[in-house]
Amino acid sequence: MGQQYDALNDKLTSFIESQKIFFVGTAAPQGKVNVSPKGMNSLRIQSLNRVLWLNVTGSGNETAAHLLSAPRMTLMFCAFEGSPMILRLYGTARAVHRGDADWEELFTQFDPLPGARQIFDMQIDMVQTSCGMAVPFFDYSEEREQLQDWAIKKGEAGIAQYWKDKNQLSLDGELTLIVEKSLRD
């Protein structure tokens, strides 16, 4: 059944690298808990205790807001094919914005994605596996292109306006710093 580790190992790293989707969970001390699916080949393993993921523009920006007041984060991966397993990474994270000194260095580790918004840099302090025997089988078909197409159509100026209009505040009214740290007028 489940096991806990202080860090990733080769088997768990291989499992992560084979996944097409993962889920992120964050919460501020008060307010709503956010759980969000992620994909698009946006995760990079930096070491056995550090991962990065490139976040693209979406309808909300909860993770960035939550990390400002409570930097804890959980990433969850599920086996939808093959042997059952659920893998959770627990740790602390920070949002790296386009205006931050280390954005360029970190961004080069990813294929450019239209609408790239932040990079989340997570330090892992616990890794946990659980059985995953209740997770159903799903067949991967293909990536969705709609978000990339939307971002390309919006263009850089349109994305910047969208961040101003829709991504500055969390659902609970907390700042995300997307405008202050990413846009230069």
Image: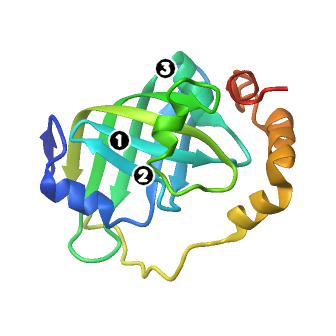
Residue 184 picture quarter: top right
Residue type at mark 1 is Val
Q: Residues within 10 Å of mark 1 (few under 14, many from 20)?
A: some
Q: CA distance from mark 3 to mark 1?
A: 18 Å
Is label 2 in contact with label 1 (beta carbons under 8 Å)? yes
Q: How many marks?
A: 3
Which quadrant does the N terminus fall into?
bottom left
For image coordinates 31% across by 61% down, the residue present is 17
Q: Is residue 105 left or right of residue 154?
A: left
* Residue marked by disc 3: 70
Work out whether mark 2 precedes mark 3 in sequence or the reverse, and give the earlier one.
2
Q: Is residue 155 left or right of residue 24?
A: right
For image coordinates 70% across by 62% down, the residue present is 147
Q: Nearer the viewer, mark 2 or mark 3?
A: 2
Q: Secondary structure at mark 3?
A: loop
In the rendered image, is residue 1 in sight?
Answer: no
For image coordinates 30% across by 58% down, the residue present is 16
Residue type at mark 3 is Ala
Which quadrant does the C terminus fall into?
top right
Q: Position of residue 58 (x, y in %)?
A: 70, 49
Q: Position of residue 178 (x, y in %)?
A: 70, 29
Residue type at mark 2 is Leu
Near-viewer residue (20 or 3):
20
* Residue marked by disc 2: 43
Is label 3 in contact with label 1 (beta carbons under 8 Å)? no
Q: Is residue 20 above or below residue 27?
A: below
* Residue marked by disc 1: 51
